[in-house]
Image (cartoon, grey):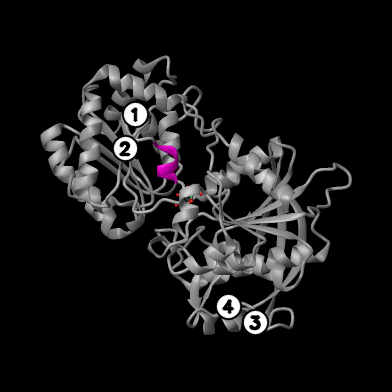
Amino acid sequence: MKKDKKSGKLKVLFVASEMAPYAKVGGLGDVLGSLPKALAENGIDVGVIIPKYEEIEKKFRLKFLLGNFEVFFGGKKEKISVYSAKREKVKVFLIENEKYLSRGPVYSSRTAFVDRFGEIQRFLFFSVAVFELLKSGKFSFRPDIVHAHDWHAGPLVSMIKNFNLPLKTVFTVHNLENQGKWRFKELEKWFFPFRGRVNFFRNFNGKCNLIAEGIINADILATVSSSYAEEIQIQKYGAGLEKIIRKSKPLGILNGVDYDFYNPGTDRFIFPNYSAKTPYLKEENKIAFQEFCGLAVGADKPLFGLVSRLTGQKGIKLLLSLIKDLTEKYGVQFVFLGQGQRILERKLLEARKRHKGNVFVKIGFDEKLAHKIYAASDFFLMPSLFEPCGLGQMIAMRYGAIPVARKTGGLKDTIKDGENGFLFGKPNSVSLKKAILKALRLFFDKARLEKMRKRCMKENFSWGKGALEYKELYYNL
Ligand code: NHF
């Protein structure tokens, strides 16, 4: 593998739809905000390129890098500009284009899953733009490896392979359920002929599948935990792609968490800062939070938090039927933050109305509130039907909120039942309730509760190990 002549460093360009703090909708944004940083600390020269969305705040000082760069797309010439920023040692690049990239929110749907052709066009355009930049020689960052993420950057991997760009590629799947599928016919008009070739994308029963393009064409396929890497090779979790995934032999590299950002000792968003040595300050967070959001106040009330996209994947339905019993019979309090399917949002809001004082719900994204929930909660709920990695349980542990989660994917890889959390197997309410009741027994046994909480806070889910695994993988390429 050739290295940058001047610095002697390997150069890797991350390509994705999100990067915290510029544009973050979910875990993908967190990973793009933290893994490049950890790699840069490990001697890799890392760049990240994302679209310059309309909502990227003015407070980020961006430098104009390149303008009037032509990209041929949809039968027309489009112009892009590239801006840059530096985040610690990471070089950030943002592509601006009025028509496709820089108008409207990051994703069109509340679930963050693709539901409109406009979104397919947006990220197809993004891939074409990055491809043309890399090819042109005009882009100052010249990578050895392109590390693409999820369907939004899948087409780029395919183009690099099909047009023999002398670059190695790594493709990481963060969520196989969101595939970027669309009617092949509709796509043809916009995308083909691309550089004189037609139809190099696969046609899967009349549909293009942009995550599959990444999976098939990448030199290395990775995903975000060992268990998920295993799971997606079987029909139950493979979302129809298990066969091509088996062929690509996915590597599971567990995500890490940015411990500078998620640190109860320094977090600016929570009530008092605290550590494992000051559990009474965590209790103060709970009380302040209960007052803050109108819950009945009391340290003796077990508080369960949930911060998540509100979709089928997240197992919210398993929880809904338990709220009445758990609040009325056991004095449990619930806090929910997230957005997604309207029906789930509505059901949660109804529960809030019905169990006023014991249930708090906020629909939407709210970073500050999310931190307050981690700090205030005794327990953190993740009843997911599947979970590629899950960052919530790792962040929760850091804040001393004990996870109660389903035994799947990354949850299974990070939680040891009865040691640093509670796991349940069957995806139904009965199993979930059993796990919650175990958590409640712990709650009322203060000595055991403190022990488990301390164990959680001592866990190390920082990027150290995962970053080294990615580094090794790059060098092996
Ligand atoms: O942690 C970042 C995140 C994962 O399980 C999560 C998910 C989406 O579903 O890798 O991506």
Residue 266 appearing in the image: yes
Q: Amino acid at mark 4?
A: Arg
Q: Disc 4 to disc 1, how far (Cα)? A: 48 Å
| 69 w.r.t. 463: above or below | below
Report the disc number at residue 202: 4
Element type at marker 1?
Answer: helix
Q: Amino acid at mark 1?
A: Ala
Check if residue 154 falls in the magenta segment: no
Residue at coordinates 33% horizontally, 42% vertically from top-left? Answer: 405
Foreground residue among 134 and 149: 149
**Proximity of marks 3 and 1: CB atoms separated by less than 8 Å:** no
Residue receiving disc 3: 192
Q: Residue 165: percent from the left, percent from the top?
A: 77, 67
Q: Is mark 3 within 8 Å of ligand 1?
A: no
Q: Residue 59: percent from the left, percent from the top?
A: 60, 42
Q: Is mark 4 within 8 Å of ligand 1?
A: no
Residue receiving disc 2: 305
Residue receiving disc 1: 376
Q: Is residue 267 left or right of residue 380?
A: right
Check if residue 412 falls in the magenta segment: yes
Residues drawn in magenta? 410-415
Looking at the rendered image, the disc whose residue lies closer to the viewer, 4 or 1, is 4
Q: Disc 3 to disc 2, how far (Cα)? A: 48 Å
Foreground residue among 375 and 168: 168
Location of the C terminus (image quadrant):
bottom right
Residue at coordinates 71% horizontally, 82% vertically from top-left? Answer: 197
Residue placed furthest toward the right:
6
**Proximity of marks 3 and 2: CB atoms separated by less than 8 Å:** no
Residue 79 appearing in the image: no
**Proximity of marks 4 and 3: CB atoms separated by less than 8 Å:** no
**Proximity of marks 2 and 1: CB atoms separated by less than 8 Å:** yes
Q: Earlier in the sequence, mark 4 or mark 3?
A: 3
